[in-house]
Image: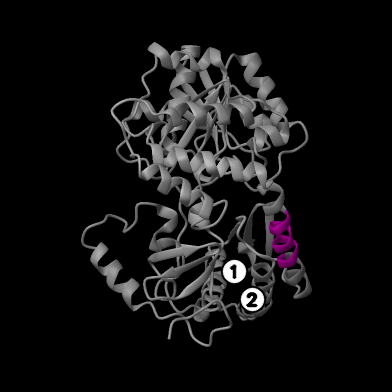
Amino acid sequence: MANKVRFNENYPEITESEKLINRADKLIPAFSQTLAKGPTQWVKGVAPNYLVRGKGSRVWDADGNEFLDYNMGIGPLILGYCNDRVDNAIKSQLEDGITFSMMHPLEVIVAEKVNSIIPNAESVRFSKTGAEVTTAAVRLARAFTKRDKVLCCGYHGWHDWYISVTDRNSGIPGNSKDLTYTFNYNDLDSLKDALDEDVACVILEPMIFEMPKPGFLESVQELCRVNGSLLIFDEMWTGFRMALGGAQQYFGITPDLAVYSKAVANGMPVSLLTGKEEYMNLLDKEVFFFSTFGGEALSLAAAMETMNIIEEENVPDAIFKKGKLLKDGYNKIAESLDMPYTKCTGYDARTIITFNSEYGNSLEMKSLVQQEMIKLGILWGGFHNMCYAHTGDDIQYTLRAYDTVLPILKKAVEEKNISNYLKGKPVEPVFRKTTNFKQAEKV
């Protein structure tokens, strides 16, 4: 019998998932199109590999097991799976067509909507993925400033200009690797050390899980202005989640350029490049950024309806309140159990649970919690990516699950034998380096 969202006695049966992944092993490098969804991020032999259906806050795997999902498609599903209004907008557009031989009116209608809610959106361009629009923004900055160097902070996609700073940079020409450097969040000195007259732009996630120190974002903006470099906000995670107008509205900082994807269309593939007209005008003739599917109508219809719902229902406020209950509840349980090595942090709509490696292998700790949460019907990757469909009952059940699972982790840590509690191979890191890497220093 398939597991459900309840206190199941056994780990889920994943026979069909295992069959599928064995077939994928012969055809698909790394198994997955999205690293965060692939098998390296889940306890092998315990977690399902393939999901086949979703509704609201729940998903069902290839074996029929039901889970409460806190990954939400790795971010896009801000409203939850199969939102009726969004799905009906897609179906309605589907009757008229998907991609056309000329422009579609939704390109204008959705651009006007974006212009009305995002502070810096004097001009708007559409594409399909976050990596595409971040790369377009960098190209625009280079064209406008006539400079080459990029300073970045956060994760910005798979293209050469960014991935060259990570340890997965094979296949990237050496001259590309010499043009991108990093600085550390909330560390102005690391940015000042890297800024010079060849820096075209500074691109950063305005917030990941750590709140900006007072004046940090304002100082970054001023340093860019003085240096003649453009400021780009990568709002893949903060856009439409921190506020309707994203982090730039939430923090009151208007960047020169900004990029969005994930939550804008509740799961449909669309991304946004927004910016001030003087920079965006370069896309008319000087900078080439065009795509066959940029104006694909199903995604634009989904984006329009998603933005309408976010605005009408004040979705950011709702998911902040729900997420705060989870964050505070987790920390209360950990404190009551005297477990100083685990904590839930981040802004309330998107939080992360961390484990202190001084007490044991942090990936094994995460894997053990994941394993036991999956047994109880919760698809858990160490995050609370909140959606509008998460209910009060979902949150209360999740806290009951934590109340059951954290004592198991505590016992394993105290015995200094976490690996013996694992039923399969633990999760792996995405990148081995996350801070203090590929930094430039002034000579």
Q: Is residue 424 visible?
A: yes
Give whichever of 206, 407 is nearer the camera: 206
Q: Amino acid at mark 2?
A: Ala
Which is nearer the N-term, disc 2 or disc 1?
1
The label number, if any, that marks residue 360 in the structure image: 1
Residue 263 image point, x, y percent: 54, 45
Q: Is residue 66 above or below residue 362?
A: below
Q: Position of residue 191 (x, y in %)?
A: 62, 28
- Disc 2 vs disc 1: Cβ atoms closer than 8 Å? no
Mark 1 closeness class: few <14, some 14–19, many ≥20 residues within 10 Å:
some
Total numbered circles: 2
Is 73 located above or below residue 280 in the figure? Answer: below
Q: Which residues are magenta?
A: 321-330
Q: Is residue 269 above or below residue 136?
A: below
Q: At 75% from the left edge and 75% from the top edge, which residue is drawn?
A: 337
Q: Residue at x 59, y 37 (%)?
A: 205
Q: Quadrant of residue 435?
A: top right
User: Circle 2 is placed at which residue position?
Assistant: 401
Label 2, secondary structure: give it.
helix
Q: Is residue 39 left or right of residue 207?
A: left
Q: Nearer the viewer, residue 41 or 316?
A: 316
Residue projecting furthest to the left: 26
Q: Is residue 2 left or right of residue 408?
A: left
User: Under tag 1, what secondary structure?
Assistant: loop
Identity, as a three-letter code, of the amino acid under mark 1: Gly
Is 324 inside the magenta-drawn segment? yes
Relative to 159, is 339 on the left or the right? right
